Image: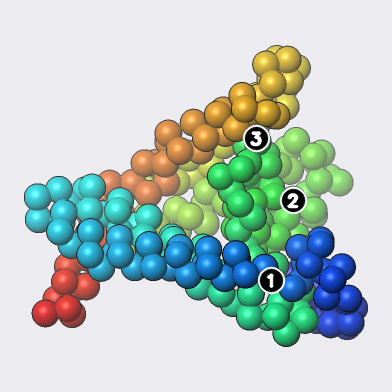
Amino acid sequence: MDAEAFFSDHSRRADAKTAGRNGSLTPRWTEWVWSVCQTAFGVWLVVELAPRLVTTQPFVAGWVALIGVVSVLHFGVSHFASLAWRSGGVDARHIMHKPLLARSVSDFWGQRWNLAFRDVMHGFVFRPLAPAIGVARASAATFVVSGLIHDAVISFTARGGWGLPTLYFLIQAAAMFVERSRMGRRMGLGRGFVGWLYAFVVIAAPAGLLFHKPFIEHVVVPMIGAIQGSGR
């Protein structure tokens, strides 16, 4: 998604040793192993575990399958694509940058999770609005637009749960402002273990608003049934 870096001649001429140090190019063998493991784990969740649970615990099965899909696509296949391009000397960073290591809500959404989507939001929402309405309001607007997009994709598909994904992103925006407030800085919400714990709770606890019950029941669970049917 970073076209400027992807098509840069400099990325192709970069010294492999230097590129390996800064992480932009030459992949480490551990990255290949990690992407294989992520893909295999996700496939196992979707194809093996979720179908076993779908009859007795459909809601749990839906979440298991959803985690599996994210593991395969966001951490597996997309990583393979990044590794393949980087092996050829192209600066194609992975869209995920160790999100579990995020030390703050800002760090998670701004530097680690789905950087392709983040770059689009930054380029088309935040950057045009910031000079006119200020950084804080532009940041809030970015979260609102992100919520509306997820509502269009998730709630529209499920035909229910309208507004819940947007509410989820409003919570993230509020949490980020608390984190950056004077009180938040005193409490260490943007750094260290406290920041990591705060980010984990804020991001994970309301996840049911983002992937709400109608989406799990009307989209994910039928997907599991289709997988079961195709495997027979």
Colouring used for the render: rainbow
Q: How many labels does the image show?
A: 3
Q: Which of marks 3 and 2 is in front?
A: 3
Locate residue 99, reporting x and y percent: 59, 48
Q: Residue at x 79, y 39 (%)?
A: 135
Query: How far is the residue under mark 2 from the one under mark 1?
Result: 32 Å
Sequence order check, earlier mark of 3 and 1: 1
Mark 3 and mark 1 residues within 8 Å of each other at the beta carbon: no
Q: Which of marks 3 and 2 is nearer the N terminus?
A: 3
Q: What element carries label 2?
A: helix
Residue pointed to by mark 3:
104
Which mark is drawn over residue 123? none
Q: Mark 1 = which residue?
A: 27
Report, in whole angstroms, how far the alpha carbon at label 3 lies from the one at label 1.
27 Å
* Whether label 2 touches label 1, CB < 8 Å: no
Q: Answer few, some or many: residues within 10 Å of disc 1's Cα (few below 14, many 20 plus, some between 14 and 19).
A: some
**Can residue 160 be seen by looking at this rendering?**
no
Q: In this view, does 205 lie to the left or right of 214?
A: right
Q: For the residue marked with disc 1, what is the amino acid?
A: Pro
Give the residue drawn at x 53%, y 42%.
Answer: 169
